[in-house]
Amino acid sequence: MQKETLEPFDYPKVNMFVCGPTVYDYTHIGHARIFIVYDVIARHLKANGYEPFILLNLTDIDVKIFDRAKKDNTDYKNIISRYKSELQKDLSLLNVRRISSFAMVSDYVSQAKENISKLLSEGYAYTANGNVYFDALKTNGYGALSHQTIADLLMRRIDLAPNKKNQFDFLVWNGRDKFDVQWESDFGSGIP
């Protein structure tokens, strides 16, 4: 590792993307840590003449949300609304002020479908039992970012699914399970 000077593409603007929670329950200390860290970084950047923009992603398409809605005997949209609102209250209580905008996964389904189609056509993804998986071994240096070899990755969590090529290939489109909401695509009905 080496220290590098920050050189934003569009000085003085600095864009940051924060992968936020799945909105099916209250936030926890792990979420709070992430929000506070990025808020402190953004405040530091602002104090040094930059214009930080933080986009916080909220996952609003997930089996946990649909299951929670069934458990609470309500519509899944009510679950999303409730826990997004609770998250915003928590951010205020934590004095996290620099989050600029929220992005809901459901607002980007069309882009996800386009990207998955491209991955399939270029051979970086494959279908198995109605699902679409990213083929990790098609990527040169897979694991390099986390300093792990393929052998290291094989020692990690096993994600068993019928007809997957490798245990570390990951799901990009779930077309096998049936959900309360689904989208149509060239590769079948499902959710990203």
Image (cartoon, rainbow, N blue to C red):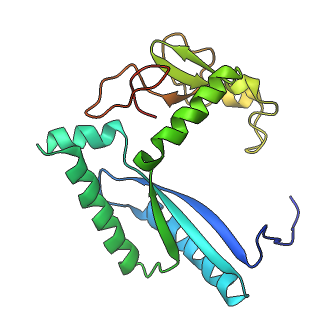
| Quarter residue 28 falls in | bottom left
Left or right, 8 with respect to 181, comes to right
Q: Residue furthest left?
A: 73
Q: Is residue 169 above or below residue 114?
A: above
Left or right, 180 with respect to 169, comes to left
* Residue at image location 78% in from the left, 32% down from the top: 149
Q: Where the N terminus falls, by quadrant?
A: bottom right
Numbered-mark total: 0
Q: Is residue 93 above or below residue 131?
A: below
Q: Position of residue 47 (x, y in %)?
A: 67, 89
* Residue at image location 26% in from the left, 39% down from the top: 66
Q: Position of residue 115 (x, y in %)?
A: 60, 35
Asked if one can make out residue 61 in the rendered structure from this viewpoint, the answer is yes
* Residue in front for this viewpoint, 169 or 77: 77
Q: Position of residue 132 (x, y in %)?
A: 53, 22
* Residue at image location 29% in from the left, 30% down from the top: 179
Q: Is residue 33 above or below residue 166?
A: below
Q: Position of residue 111 (x, y in %)?
A: 54, 41
Asked if one can make out residue 160 in the rendered structure from this viewpoint, the answer is no
* Residue at image location 41% in from the left, 32% down from the top: 191
